[in-house]
Image (tube, coloured by chain):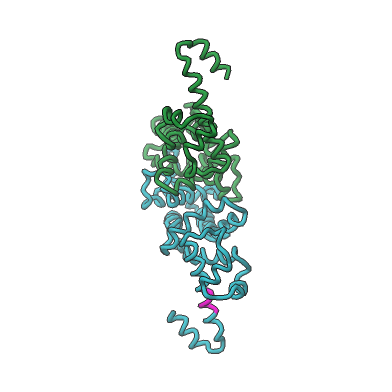
Chain colours: A cyan, B green
Amino acid sequence: MPAMTSAVESAPRSPGRPRSARADEAIIEAVLDLLAEGSTIESLSIEAIAARAGVGKATIYRRWSGKQALLVDALRSLKGDPPTPKGESVRDDLVLLMRGVGHNPDPRASKIMPCLVPEARRSPEQYALYQELVQPRRELTREVLRRGVRTGELRADLDIEVAMVMLTGPVLMQKILKWHPEIDEDDLPERVVDTLLAGLAPS
Amino acid sequence: MPAMTSAVESAPRSPGRPRSARADEAIIEAVLDLLAEGSTIESLSIEAIAARAGVGKATIYRRWSGKQALLVDALRSLKGDPPTPKGESVRDDLVLLMRGVGHNPDPRASKIMPCLVPEARRSPEQYALYQELVQPRRELTREVLRRGVRTGELRADLDIEVAMVMLTGPVLMQKILKWHPEIDEDDLPERVVDTLLAGLAPS
């Protein structure tokens, strides 16, 4: 909030902006609170969001084209920015990105995020929402793999799309479900990356 | 059914057995029909199963200790027997086992099975049910990996538990959700096995 006050002071010619930013934030928070309290994505309505945020529906529609676009922004805000690959070691960057899978500092995330994958099965809208939400993080991983091919850290004939699901799939399944009870989550990102880099065939 | 008739003819001293086998089958079918029609595992009751199968509740409790044990039998029957590894090539056996992940010839399976992973999150009972259901198939895969270490087809320092989730996780996520829309399911088992065997590091 101090940053916002100083923006008002340093930019007196756009007095509407901070109020609108505050409304945006209240709307995003309303979405996340309602979802964390158990509202499903399906049942969440613009009316309920407006009421909870203390704004009119028109305020929401001025900023977002509809529920889908608002949900994408709210869920991205919940997850925070993805980690930034350092660009030194492909192995270390993959571990960094895999450590971010299912890792969400906001306590509301533990109520909201594990439902997204199952809910994505329910309708084309929810499937599209999930795909749009994860797309930027997927692109980060894809880019690290492409870089590895360029630098020679990874083999040239790499099956990049399959490598992506082999890295993320097990980490996500463990986070959502503790899928294999005997596997410890803590060092799974390292174990997955190192197992995939080395391969199972004898060297 | 012909096999059952001949069992009666060749074993006249246990006349109760075929009738009991028919009741068992009717009970299993009732469970699968009710689940395929949309009943959740949570809401499924022994009363409803008995009514649908045309048997008394006592008949069910004579054969199964409770709903959990009955569900495990019903879901294993739905999935059918897992494929049998041929024991020649570890690579081919892994592909065979991965082809079986999420592959269910019974049309009711497409309604029932994709819900099991999400439902396993709901309660300790459903989690235990899922673990009990998948355990024999996991053991088959684990045994093929152990065999590969013994024969030298796989590296001696293999992380077997992590290799298991890296093989099955991506195939299952694609089957449940078409998780990465751009990946074709048909040859995914081969691509996953071959990518994991070769590894990402340059050879």
Is residue B203 among the parts visible in the rendering?
Answer: no
Judging depth in this view, the residue of B74 and A110 nearest the camera is B74
Query: In the picture, which quadrant includes the N terminus of chain A?
Result: bottom left
Q: Residue at x 47, y 63 (%)?
A: A79
* Residue B73 locus on image (x, y percent): 46, 32
Q: Indicate whether residue B47 is drawn in magenta.
A: no
In percent of width and height, residue B136 lies at 43, 33
Q: Residue A203's image quarter?
A: top left
Closer to the camera in the image, B192 or A13: A13
Q: Is residue A184 left or right of residue A37?
A: left
Q: Compared to B25, does A33 lie above or below?
A: below
A3 vs B89: above or below: below
Height in image: A14 above or below A85?
Answer: below
Q: Is residue A92 above or below residue A197?
A: below
Residue at image point 47% right, 81% down: A4
Please tell me whether the stretch drawn in magenta is mainly helix, strand or loop.
helix
Total tally of numbered discs in the picture = 0
Residue A123 x/y as whole percent? 60, 53
Image coordinates for residue B25, horizontal then vertical, percent: 52, 27
- The image quadrant of residue A139 is bottom right
Q: Which residues are magenta?
A: A20-25
Tell me if I can see residue B15 in this picture: yes
